[in-house]
């Protein structure tokens, strides 16, 4: 299990860590300095809030939802179907989140119809139909294999 | 404190999947390292061509280089979204470690992790919504994306150092472990392979969903592409229309002239008829947008080199083209000495044999090899020569 510190765990290398610090800290400092010097464009304060906020939104919102959906799915789906259904749920979640601004048309401007010119809702629906077809085929193949080896 | 420790401990025990494992984390980490490095290198290149550095002029060949690098940048970014989420899920038990900070090194590692997770999530989120042309912030996207990338790269370097020994041992550990641990590894290997294969498949779904912006034959499958390759005036997409740029009246004014000024022997003022009477040059060149889509067309007009020669400009001269667009960051662009020398650097009047549509820059637009679309300046009325 990750995050356990048993006697068998390999010892982290102190040298590699400090080499990483010596190389990495100046790069981070360069980035922070760049955001501050160019704050008229980069809005250093707002950007900082976005950076830290993105990590917090992942850890406090996205990850718990993923863990809860995973736990529920695992309880609900038969054992042979779970790997496929788990994949279907993961892919559906990723596609729905990534496609959200496209489907909602947040950036669409009718003055320039060549940009964002697709029917994104239809496309996402078709993609998810393909994902769940693949999920069903995968699950059925797993079941057949399980039965033939039983 | 004891309660917090006990709660975290109980939560920790609920991570029962064998996938919360160093070997899985190391493989996903390696994949992310490759994808993020690809994004960093192509992103740095994109920055240099979009914000030219005087002492580092970018060559004009290969003509389609930027279309490839920027297509790769966007594709690698989309591909890394499922990998990042999977990696963070695999290492989720670490989030519940107690104490939160064990010692100085552990504290520094966790600060770097905050910047790495926040930086990665922000870079991917901002890249995706930039493609969706949605800007829920007040900063200028390229500047914020660039400086956040430096912070993320630095944090990634620290993280690689911190996990170096553990990950490299996890990647090869089968040879080193006692026999019973090897048995456990072998027994759970199908789970790990399936999981890593599934993450790859999800990445493929997103890549196919977007890559049609660059590879037009995949466009029918690209359900998230910002463009259709031939949707737009004259079958070419448009980033900003003449009306949006508030230049329509000036663009169609019959009194329009191109002036050539600056470090020349004789300043020139040419009408459209004068330009059409000059030696015609043509080239197949892509419009390659920083947002990852690109479309090739056959452009024809007058070579910048011929105009510079006509005005008596020095052979090594550089130039600035000025648009009639009065506002906006991209109403002028610089041509370096490679670009002014290259005969495929055109002030184009026609595309695919037809007079330019106003949305494509009528009466005159720049089309040069290996340039980002925002620097293929439209509605030009002045060419300023710099010695």
Image: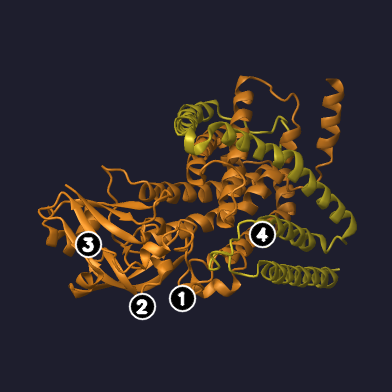
Chain colours: A yellow, B orange
Q: Are marks 2 and 1 in contact (CB under 8 Å)?
A: yes
**Secondary element type, mark 2:** loop
Disc 1 crowd, CA 10 A, few/some/many (<14, 14-19, 20+): some
Whether labels 3 and 4 belong to a single chain: the reply is: no
Say which chain tag 4 marks.
Answer: A
**Residue located beneath label 2 in the image:** B352
Image-based side of B70 in relation to B64, left or right: right
In the rendered image, the quadrant that contains the N terminus of chain B is top right
Spatial CA distance of label 2 from label 4 is 34 Å
Q: Residue furthest bottom?
A: B353
**Residue located beneath label 4 in the image:** A99
Say which chain tag 2 marks.
Answer: B
**Residue located beneath label 3 in the image:** B304
Along the polypeptide, which appears first: circle 2 or circle 1?
A: 1
**Residue located beneath label 1 in the image:** B235
Q: Report the mark closest to the observer, 4 or 1.
A: 1
Whether labels 4 and 1 belong to a single chain: the reply is: no
Spatial CA distance of label 2 from label 1 is 10 Å
Image-based side of B39 in relation to B136, left or right: left
Whether labels 2 and 3 belong to a single chain: the reply is: yes
């Amino acid at each position: 299990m990750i995050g356990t510190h048993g006697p068998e765990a390999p010892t982290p290398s102190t040298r590699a860590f400090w080499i990483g610090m010596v190389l990495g800290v100046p790069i981070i400092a360069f980035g922070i300095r760049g955001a501050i010097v160019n704050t008229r464009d980069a809005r250093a304060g707002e950007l900082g809030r976005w950076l830290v906020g993105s990590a917090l939104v992942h850890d406090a919102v996205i990850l718990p939802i993923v863990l809860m959906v995973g736990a529920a799915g695992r309880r609900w789906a038969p054992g042979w179907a779970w790997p496929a259904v788990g994949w279907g749920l993961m892919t559906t979640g990723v596609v729905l989140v990534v496609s959200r601004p496209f489907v909602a048309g947040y950036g669409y401007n009718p003055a320039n119809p060549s940009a964002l010119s697709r029917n994104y809702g239809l496309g996402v629906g078709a993609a998810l139909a393909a994902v769940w077809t693949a999920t069903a085929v995968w699950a059925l193949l797993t079941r057949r294999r399980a039965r033939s080896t039983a | 404190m004891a309660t917090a420790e006990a709660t975290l401990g109980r939560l920790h025990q609920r991570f029962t999947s064998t996938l919360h494992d160093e070997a899985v984390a190391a493989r996903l980490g390696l994949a992310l390292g490759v994808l993020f490095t690809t994004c960093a290198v192509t992103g740095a290149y994109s920055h240099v061509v979009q914000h030219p550095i005087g002492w580092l002029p970018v060559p004009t060949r290969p003509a389609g280089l930027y279309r490839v690098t920027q297509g790769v940048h966007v594709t690698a970014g989309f591909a890394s979204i499922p990998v990042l989420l999977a990696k963070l899920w695999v290492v989720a038990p670490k989030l519940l470690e107690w104490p939160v900070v064990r010692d100085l090194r552990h504290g520094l590692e966790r600060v770097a992790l905050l910047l790495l997770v926040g930086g990665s999530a922000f870079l991917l989120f901002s890249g995706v919504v930039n493609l969706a042309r949605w800007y829920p912030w007040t900063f200028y996207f390229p500047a914020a994306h660039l400086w956040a990338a430096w912070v993320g790269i630095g944090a990634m370097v620290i993280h690689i150092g911190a996990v170096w020994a553990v990950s490299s041992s996890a990647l090869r550990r089968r040879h080193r472990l006692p026999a019973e641990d090897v048995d456990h590894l072998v027994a759970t290997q199908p789970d790990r392979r399936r999981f890593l294969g599934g993450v790859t498949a999800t990445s493929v779904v997103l890549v196919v969903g977007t890559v049609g912006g660059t590879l037009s034959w995949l466009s029918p499958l690209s359900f998230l592409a910002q463009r259709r390759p031939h949707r737009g005036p004259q079958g070419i997409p448009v980033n900003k229309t003449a009306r949006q740029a508030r230049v329509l009246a000036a663009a169609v004014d019959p009194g329009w002239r191109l002036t050539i000024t600056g470090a020349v022997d004789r300043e020139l003022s040419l009408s459209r008829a004068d330009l059409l009477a000059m030696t015609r040059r043509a080239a197949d060149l892509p419009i390659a947008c920083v947002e990852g889509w690109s479309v090739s067309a056959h452009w024809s007009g007058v070579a910048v080199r011929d105009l510079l020669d006509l005005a008596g400009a020095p052979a090594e001269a550089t130039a600035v083209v000025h648009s009639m667009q009065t506002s906006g960051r991209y109403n002028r662009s610089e041509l370096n000495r490679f670009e002014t020398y290259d005969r495929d650097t055109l002030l184009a009047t026609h595309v695919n044999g037809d007079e330019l549509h106003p949305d494509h820059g009528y009466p005159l637009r720049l089309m040069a090899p290996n340039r980002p679309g925002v620097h293929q300046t439209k509605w030009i009325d002045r060419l300023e020569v710099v010695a």
